[in-house]
Image (cartoon, rainbow, N blue to C red):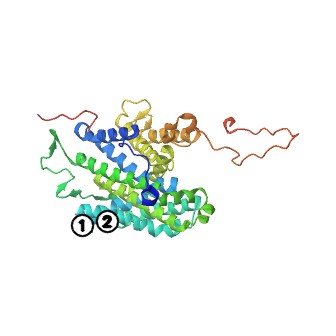
């Protein structure tokens, strides 16, 4: 009986699966990320945790700005919701000075998930505005979130601790504390404290954030958001509900920020209102522009660059020219000012020479810096007997940096 009659569709036989070089490199990179707690000191682990916070937050902002085409200057507000939300939900309300701090007393892992949901609810509450406003108008509207959040953090003393903030409860998973517990836990002779344990927890969060963002971009929601960013009229013709997708993008981005804020609270062990300023939102925008708009890998690369640079300058301020330590009376730039100056220069160079960001450099400097053609419409044929018109082409325009010692 023929294949057509039997209903069996035959095709070419598939060979065994073979991983690509990029997949091998990604697997090797993941293995390397497991080793730092065994060898690096507390300073480098703290710097790495702050980089993980920046990566998660930048991926969420890139989904909103790079994919959905919505400008947001209030991303730091949702980090604050996640940080204070986890602290309030996981704390059982101890006294701090003369003020009584309230708390729910949930299990830490459940409080972490609830803080992410709380940030998503805050984003969904703002979504009616985000679904109607665009461009500069949406950016100005989100800017109001920063001022509102800072006022609330300073005055809601029972929830936030006021100006001095409040201590963050330790994370605990299945009875294992991720803080500096004196339980004698060691791996390969290296004692594992709070930073070592939080390192692997942060790696899991980063992996979940990257996989979720990739799946979203490759699926129908990602294509719909890309269509809205390119042309709202064309997306409406294709049946994409603009307001609903914009509101959903803002909500998802807020949940990413909530996860990053909760991890930041765990890494810093104390949250204060000054963490979540307008400058933090500007740093997040610099991350995704330097790394590459619309790219998960680009957002991660830009986040690592912008978040690690101030830490390195502060750590080596005594060995660098023109850079002085914080609080020093010597002439020179402070480490924070020098870091902003350097990645400001990097931001300008990226916009001029590589508009696709750091991720575009994988295609080579020529293709990374290539701009869109000046005249995107097709040229019409020149009538006979007329000299062709020559058009200008686009090309004419804490612990130091020592290694850990293993106990025998």
The percent coordinates of residue 117 (x first, y second) are 36, 65
Quarter where residue 308 is shown = top left
For numbered disc 2, what is the local secondary structure? Answer: helix
Pick the residue in front: 210 or 9: 9
Please give left or right for residue 315 compared with residue 382 in the image: left
Mark 1 touches mark 2? (CB < 8 Å): yes
Please give left or right for residue 110 compared with residue 320 in the image: left
Q: Residue furthest right?
A: 385
For numbered disc 1, what is the local secondary structure? Answer: loop
Please give left or right for residue 102 compared with residue 327 in the image: left
Density class for disc 1 (Cα within 10 Å; few <14, some 14-19, many ≥20) is some
Q: Quadrant of the N terminus?
A: bottom left
Q: Is residue 403 something one can see in this rendering?
A: yes
Which residue is rendered at x = 78% and y = 38% of the image? 390
Which residue is rendered at x = 40% and y = 44% of the image? 307
The percent coordinates of residue 9 (x first, y second) are 44, 55
* Residue occupied by mark 1: 106
Query: CA–CA distance between discs 1 and 2?
Result: 9 Å
Q: Does residue 284 sit above or below 251 in this rendering?
A: above
Pick the residue in front: 159 or 303: 303
Q: Is residue 327 something one can see in this rendering?
A: no
* Residue occupied by mark 2: 114
Pick the residue in front: 191 or 227: 227
Which residue is rendered at x = 12% and y = 50% of the image? 183
Mark number, residue 354 = none
Give whichever of discs 1 and 2 has the lower sequence position.
Answer: 1
Please give left or right for residue 36 compared with residue 20 in the image: left
The percent coordinates of residue 99 (x first, y second) are 27, 67
Q: Quadrant of the C terminus?
A: top left
Which residue is rendered at x = 12% and y = 46% of the image? 184
Q: Does residue 387 sit above or below 133 in this rendering?
A: above
Q: Does residue 203 sit above or below 225 in this rendering?
A: above
């Amino acid at each position: 009986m023929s294949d057509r009659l039997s209903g069996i569709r035959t095709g070419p036989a598939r060979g065994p699966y073979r991983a690509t070089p990029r997949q091998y490199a990604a697997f090797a990179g993941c293995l390397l990320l497991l080793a730092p707690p065994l060898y690096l000191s507390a300073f480098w682990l703290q710097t790495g945790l702050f980089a993980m916070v920046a990566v998660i937050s930048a991926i969420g902002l890139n989904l909103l700005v790079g994919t959905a085409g919505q400008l947001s200057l209030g991303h730091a507000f949702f980090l604050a919701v996640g940080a204070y939300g986890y602290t309030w939900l996981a704390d059982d309300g101890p006294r701090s000075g003369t003020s009584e701090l309230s708390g729910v007393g949930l299990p830490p892992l459940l409080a972490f998930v609830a803080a992410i949901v709380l940030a998503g609810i805050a984003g969904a509450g703002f979504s009616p505005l985000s679904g109607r406003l665009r461009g500069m108008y949406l950016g100005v509207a989100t800017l109001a979130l920063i001022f509102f959040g800072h006022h609330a953090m300073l005055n809601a003393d029972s929830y936030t601790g006021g100006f001095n903030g409040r201590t963050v409860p330790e994370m605990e998973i299945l009875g294992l504390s991720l803080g500096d517990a004196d339980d004698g836990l060691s791996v390969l002779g290296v004692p594992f404290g709070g930073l070592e344990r939080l390192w692997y927890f942060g790696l899991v969060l980063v992996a979940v954030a990257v996989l979720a963002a990739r799946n979203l971009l490759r699926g129908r929601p990602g294509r719909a958001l890309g269509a809205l960013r390119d042309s709202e009229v064309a997306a409406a013709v294709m049946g994409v509900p603009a307001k609903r997708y914009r509101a959903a993008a803002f909500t998802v981005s807020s949940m990413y920020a909530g996860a990053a804020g909760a991890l930041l609270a765990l890494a810093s062990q104390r949250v204060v209102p000054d963490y979540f300023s307008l400058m933090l939102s500007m740093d997040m925008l610099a991350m995704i522009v330097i790394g590459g708009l619309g790219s998960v890998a680009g957002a991660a690369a830009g986040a690592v660059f912008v978040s690690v640079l101030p830490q390195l300058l502060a750590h080596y301020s005594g060995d660098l020219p023109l850079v002085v330590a914080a609080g020093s009376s010597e002439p020179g730039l402070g480490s924070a000012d020098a870091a902003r100056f350097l990645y400001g220069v990097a931001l300008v160079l990226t916009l001029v020479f590589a508009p696709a960001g750091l991720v575009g450099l994988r295609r080579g400097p020529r293709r990374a810096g290539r701009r869109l053609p000046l005249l995107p419409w097709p040229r019409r044929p020149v009538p006979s007997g007329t000299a062709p018109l020559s058009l200008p082409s686009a090309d004419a325009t804490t612990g130091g940096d020592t290694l850990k010692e293993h106990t025998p």
